[in-house]
Image (cartoon, helix red, strand yellow):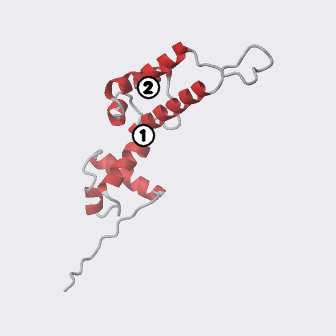
Amino acid sequence: MERQRSEEVIKKGPWTAEEDEVLLNFVNSYGPRDWSSIRSMGLLPRTGKSCRLRWVNKLRPNLKIGCKFSAEEERVVIDLQARFGNKWASIASYLPGRTDNDVKNFWSSRQKRLARILQSPPKSSNSQRSKGKATAVPEMATSQVTRTSV
């Protein structure tokens, strides 16, 4: 005998402007907490986790969306990554308006940029490039990168 359960429909995928408005109104009324009550109150067919992530990553008023990291923010990320490792949420807690995903993406882009710099041959001051000669990476440059990437 098979049990019949009425499955609640949980919406997945892109958020609509109307859903964002409902979520903003909820947060304005109750504060940014008790996320699962949004569905239990019948306000949105989304999970509490989905609502919390939408608020944290897209709708919070103090988010720095589309802004480059300042020199100070870069320094903080580099220092804290050396201290905490890849604990992006912990690092983001030191940077107001930045999400853990912002910090992770910044770090990843920085690592790729450093790798590209180390792989490209140094530009010579001569107009001709040396043909067939291997170019060595200066010892100082590799030791600096190794220290910061740990």
Q: Secondary structure at mark 1?
A: helix
Q: Is residue 63 visible?
A: no
Quadrant of the rendered structure where residue 76 is?
top left
Where is residue 28 shown, x and y percent of the image?
A: 33, 46
Question: Which mark identifies residue 149?
Answer: 2
Mark 1 crowdedness (10 Å alpha carbons): few <14, some 14-19, many ≥20: few
Q: Residue at x 39, y 37 (%)?
A: 100
Q: Pick whichever of labels 2 and 1 is earlier in the sequence.
A: 1
Mark 2 crowdedness (10 Å alpha carbons): few <14, some 14-19, many ≥20: some
Quadrant into which the N terminus falls: bottom left
Nearer to me, 35 or 116: 116
Q: Point out the frontmost of discs 2 and 1.
A: 2
Q: Residue at x 46, y 24 (%)?
A: 74
Residue under circle 1? 101
In three-dimensional space, the C-alpha distance between marks 2 and 1, rounded to whole angstroms, equals 18 Å
**Is residue 49 found left or right of 60 in the rendered image?**
left
Quadrant of the rendered structure where residue 120 is?
top right
**Is residue 49 found left or right of 3 in the rendered image?**
right
Where is residue 94 shown, x and y percent of the image?
A: 35, 27
96 versus 75 height, above or below: below
Q: Residue at x 42, y 53 (%)?
A: 21
Most extreme residue toward the bottom, as rendered? Answer: 1
Question: Which mark identifies residue 147?
Answer: none
95 versus 125 height, above or below: below
Quadrant into which the C terminus falls: top left
Quadrant of the rendered structure where residue 146 is?
top left
Q: Residue at x 60, y 28 (%)?
A: 119
Where is residue 44 shown, x and y percent of the image?
A: 35, 61
Mark 1 belongs to which amino acid?
Asn
Mark 2 belongs to which amino acid?
Ser
Mark 2 near mark 1, Cβ–Cβ under 8 Å?
Answer: no
Where is residue 13 shown, x and y percent of the image?
A: 45, 60
